[in-house]
Image (spheres, rainbow, N blue to C red):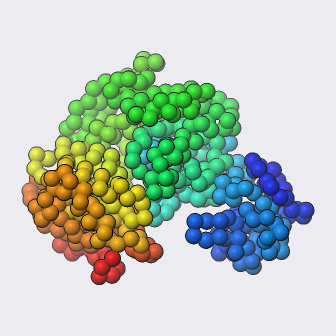
């Protein structure tokens, strides 16, 4: 595709080059991965300015550059275009380069603080059970036909070029639908710019990512982009535009207002929505429940192996999205009941121990609360929770996480969770203060064990027959960050090692 054709797809171009050039390789924002014939996108970042790497990108084969600096201030020997915000432009450029693949797909986006991955997987499985050729891009992996590709070490939407490449591969594979787990970072940073969504699903909005967004209002507004853009996105023949909104969430009215020009389906576990939970009962094997679409008169009774009432809301969200797409109720029921285990989501770890061991991704105060309430239904004995709070992230969350743990678990083990360049000891002290504020007693009801592997081993040593040990915060993630280095780490393998009595060591240095 010609550079001029790519530029025509951008909302705003401040300077265009006099010379045109053919772009014959994928677009990249990393000078090290630019391919010969490719387009390099330079931008000002929080810690670096990649305009300084234009020479390196050209040396690696870039035949054109798009950046934010005026052309007169850039040393560039190939055609150069200037845009107001290169990060926001990247998604549109990648979409155009791949010939707008999302226009050939029905795209379902799932956003919210908690429950995104489970809800996305439920929708994906429901569509599969309906015989729909469907792909998925989640914070765990991208699923394209029989191929599953990991999408990163930590949880966020993949980069814009990666998203568009996955979508193009889905179209080439003959898929007709795609489910995308859409994060607030992905929306705010433009990683899903150029994705033409059809269904937008909201799980909930709670305290999270305020370190990045600056305020709850900004965080909510980032999520809201998925809904406000529905009406103006590309219209596909026979595909509805629909917003699916959790009416039990305090922010429901905000999202209803943003999406008022498209069809709306509300759901509620308390009976306030169009799709409601009629009844439910928990058993050791899972939950039996019934949902009702009051507008269509469709009732679906189901059994799920998922535990926790919060997962019933995820099921309502997924069922509502499926109903928006006119999926038969039989397929919705099968999709719910045959959902495969989701990595790191209430995942049981069994090494023959006489207590229950679980790994869950709960890394927000709300998610930790729901996870601990859920495992309470599994035992009449003690709940022992192992968790931390990430460095260089929302500081207030540290206290809140510890308060929730101290109130709902019998014993908390406070430990490392991606301290990054912050002092781990300082993070744990803030958490300890939170636990003490709600009556926690260090050495009795809560402990500090900085090394996560040792913390898991300590929790397993404390556990008695019938107890539940739950490791929260890391889930499926495959690394832990100390300083600026990502070290290999998998909570599931670490918990298995702890159960076998051979704990893994976490801390790369004696003290952080």
For image coordinates 52% across by 27% down, the residue present is: 264
Q: Nearer the viewer, residue 334 or 51?
A: 51
Q: Nearer the viewer, residue 214 or 419?
A: 214
Q: Nearer the viewer, residue 92 or 47?
A: 47
- In the rendered structure, the answer to whether residue 448 lies left or right of residue 466 reads right
**Residue 144: horizontal and vertical position, in percent?**
55, 53
For image coordinates 91% across by 62% down, the residue present is: 18
**Residue 295: horizontal and vertical position, in percent?**
46, 18
- In the rendered structure, the answer to whether residue 383 lies left or right of residue 243 reads left
Report if residue 173 is visible in the image: no
Picture layout, residue 12 above or below residue 449: above
**Residue 199: horizontal and vertical position, in percent?**
55, 36
Q: Nearer the viewer, residue 246 or 176?
A: 246
- In the rendered structure, the answer to whether residue 246 lies left or right of residue 508 reads right
**Residue 360: horizontal and vertical position, in percent?**
31, 54
For image coordinates 18% across by 45% down, the residue present is: 376
Question: Across the whole image, how many numbered discs are drawn on residues?
Answer: 0
Give the quadrant of the C terminus. Answer: bottom left
Give the quadrant of the N terminus. Answer: bottom right
């Amino acid at each position: 595709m010609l550079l001029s054709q790519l530029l025509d797809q951008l909302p705003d171009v401040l300077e265009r080059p006099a010379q045109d050039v053919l772009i014959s390789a994928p677009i990249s924002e990393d000078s090290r991965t630019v391919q010969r014939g490719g387009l390099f996108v330079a931008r000002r970042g929080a810690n670096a300015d990649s305009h300084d790497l234009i020479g390196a990108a050209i040396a690696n084969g870039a035949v054109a550059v798009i950046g934010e600096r005026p052309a007169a201030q850039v040393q560039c020997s190939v055609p150069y275009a200037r845009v107001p915000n290169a990060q926001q432009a990247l998604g549109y450029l990648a979409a155009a380069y791949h010939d707008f693949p999302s226009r050939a797909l029905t795209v379902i986006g799932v956003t919210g603080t908690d429950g995104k991955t489970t809800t996305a997987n439920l929708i994906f499985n429901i569509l599969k059970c309906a015989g729909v050729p469907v792909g998925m891009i989640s914070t765990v992996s991208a699923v394209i036909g029989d191929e599953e590709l990991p999408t990163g070490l930590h949880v966020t939407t993949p980069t814009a070029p990666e998203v568009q490449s996955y979508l193009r591969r889905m179209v080439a594979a003959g898929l007709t639908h795609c489910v995308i787990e859409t994060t607030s970072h992905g929306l705010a940073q433009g990683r899903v710019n150029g994705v033409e969504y059809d269904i937008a699903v909201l799980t909930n909005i709670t305290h999270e990512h305020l370190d990045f967004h600056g305020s709850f209002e900004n965080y909510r507004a980032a999520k809201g982009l998925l809904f406000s853009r529905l009406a103006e996105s590309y219209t596909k023949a026979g595909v509805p535009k629909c917003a699916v909104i959790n009416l039990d969430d305090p922010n429901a009215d905000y999202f209803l207002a943003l999406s008022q020009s498209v069809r709306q389906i509300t759901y509620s576990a308390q009976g306030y929505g169009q799709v409601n939970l009629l009844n439910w009962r928990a058993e050791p094997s899972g939950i039996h429940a019934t949902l009702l679409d009051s507008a269509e008169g469709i009732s679906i009774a189901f059994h799920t192996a998922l535990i926790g009432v919060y997962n019933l809301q995820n099921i309502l969200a997924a069922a509502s999205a499926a109903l928006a797409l006119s999926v038969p109720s039989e397929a919705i029921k099968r999709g719910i009941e045959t959902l495969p285990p989701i990595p790191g989501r209430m995942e049981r770890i069994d090494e023959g121990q006489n207590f229950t061991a679980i790994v869950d991704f709960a890394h927000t105060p709300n998610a930790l609360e729901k996870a601990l309430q859920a495992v309470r239904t599994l035992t009449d004995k003690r709940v022992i929770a192992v968790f931390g709070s990430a460095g260089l992230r929302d500081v207030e969350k540290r206290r809140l996480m510890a308060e929730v743990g101290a109130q709902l678990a019998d014993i908390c083990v406070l430990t490392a969770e991606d301290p990054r360049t912050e002092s781990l000891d300082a993070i744990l002290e803030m958490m300890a203060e939170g636990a003490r504020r709600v009556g926690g007693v260090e050495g009795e009801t809560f402990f500090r064990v900085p090394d996560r592997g040792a913390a898991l081993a300590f929790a397993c040593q404390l556990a008695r027959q019938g107890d539940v040990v739950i490791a929260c915060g890391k889930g499926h993630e495959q690394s832990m960050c100390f300083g600026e280095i990502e070290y290999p780490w998998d909570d599931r393998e670490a918990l298995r090692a702890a159960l076998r009595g051979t704990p893994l060591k976490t801390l790369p240095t004696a003290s952080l």
